[in-house]
Structure formats: C-alpha cells, structure tokens
Image (tube, rainbow, N blue to C red):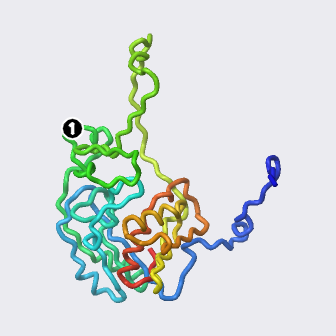
Amino acid sequence: MMHMNVGKTVLRIDAVEKAAGTVQYLGDSSFPGLLHAKLVTSTHAHAKIISIDTDEAWKVPGVRAIITGELFPFHIGPILADRPPLAFEKVRYHGEPLAIVVADQEFQAKQAAFKVKVEYEPLPVVNSVQQAFQKNSPLVHENSGQYQKIISNVYPVQGTNIGSHIKIRKGDFISAWENCEVKISKHFSFNISDHAAIETRSARVEINPAGKVIVHSTTQSPYTIKKVLNQFFNIEVGNIIVHAPLVGGAFGGKGTVQLEPLAYLASKSVGGNLSN
C-alpha cells in the first residue's frame, strides 16, 4: 500500500533523542580496553621525507605502537589510488599524516606524537591552480598515470598536475563560437571553502578474535569504507562490519574515506581495539 505524506507533518526519527539531548554520537562512546591514536602530520606542503625518528616517542609511558608509511607503502583511494594512508618517500600537502602513535590514554598518544622528529628536504610548492597548469610547474604526483583506477571514467594525465581530464562535447561548439556576434571572455576565481560540521571526523576499529573488522565511523558512506578495506587490505567483505551512528553534520564532507584505513592499520598493530 502506498502512503502519501505530502502536506502532512512527518516526525524525524531522531527528533526525540536530539530534543532530549540523549543522542549518542561516536565521540560520546567509550569501551574498556580502548586504545587511542594520534597522528603525526607534515609541517611542509611538499618535501622529501629524509627520516622519521621515533626514539623519544617510544619513551613516553603507555605507548603501544608507532606506525609509519613503511608499514603500508601503497596508494589507496575510492576513485583513483592516489594517496597513501601514511606518507612515504615524500609529503604532498601540509598536514598529511606521517605516523600514528597508539597509546593507552589519549594524552599519552598526543605527548608521544609531539616527540616524533621528522627530517625533510623541502621541494618546490604549487601555490595556485594557475601555477599547477603551467608546463614548468612542480609535479605533486610524478607517477599519476600509473595509479590504479578504481572506476573507469577517471583520466589522470601523466607528467602534469591534472588529476583527471574529462572532455564534454555537446553540439558543434566551434561553429557556434565562430558565428557569435558578441564574445565575452572573463576570468573568475573564488576563495577556498570547506565543509564545517561541528562534529569532527572520528573512527574506531576493532579486529576481534574471529577476524571480523568492526568499524564505527562518522561517515556518510559506510559501503565505501567496506569497498576500500576489501580492495586494498584484502579483507573479505563479509568480515567487514561498519556501524554509522548519527552524524553531527556532514554536508558531503564525510563521504570520503580518511581515518578508517589509518584506524585499521593502528588497530592491527596492537591486536585489535582502537579509537582515532
């Protein structure tokens, strides 16, 4: 039977919990034995990684593991495999994850992360889209043409900074342009913008004794998480369980896979239970 709700008031399924203040977001939950992870991120926008010194970080009480890109030196991605979970050989943007510190308590992980020392060799930086298109522009991805395609309609251009070149042709544009009575050419640019949800990204991964990978994530795309973990970490789809609790704002910004592979690597390094 078809139910028509046009013109009727429909109660949101989360309205009562939100109004009562009883909603449990991922950041509100905690479990016995849960370990915590903090990221060491790049202070350079473009640089070779000369060395990562973790000796002092290991001296912090409670540290269980420190993972660097050498553990998983591969690129992953839901569309084009163009990004390593942890940078290796070089960093490509300011804030790119370099290492994960796992500890008993969050403050211990944070303290140890500050003690990880990274030596860089700075590389030329691409500062604008206009510069990125120039022939002599520094290349952020030197081997983009060799990256694995996850979907068919993505076309990186080797030897350039073009991540995907897609041609759209509708009608006879050339003839129409040549016969125009008035032609106006303008250049437009906009400031960088980003999604600004109050709830930050968060992920928790548990690998239980049965081999099930249980993911809790502030995500809009639980099936993409399953896809990435299956394709790049060789985990059977049936062994990946993704829980997506109520999301505290997203606007499309939580549709990508970011923290989940990192949380998986960290959880695997300590035998199972981790929050990122």
For the point 19% across and 57% down, the residue is: 122
User: Whole-percent x and y of residue 135?
Assistant: 21, 38
Which residue is rendered at x = 46% and y = 86% of the image?
209
Residue under the image location 50 percent in, 53 percent down: 195
Q: Nearer the viewer, residue 98 or 56?
A: 98
- Dividing the picture into quadrants, the one containing residue 16 is bottom right
In terms of image quadrants, where is residue 86?
bottom left
Q: Quadrant of the N terminus?
A: bottom right
Q: Secondary structure at mark 1?
A: loop
> Where residue 98 sits: x, y (%)?
30, 68
Front-most of residues 234 and 52: 234
246 to the left or right of 132 = right
**Residue 77, how many percent across, how many down?**
38, 58
User: Which residue is at the front of the view, 229 or 115?
Assistant: 229
Q: Amino acid at mark 1?
A: Lys
Query: Can you identify the residue that label 1 sits on?
Result: 135
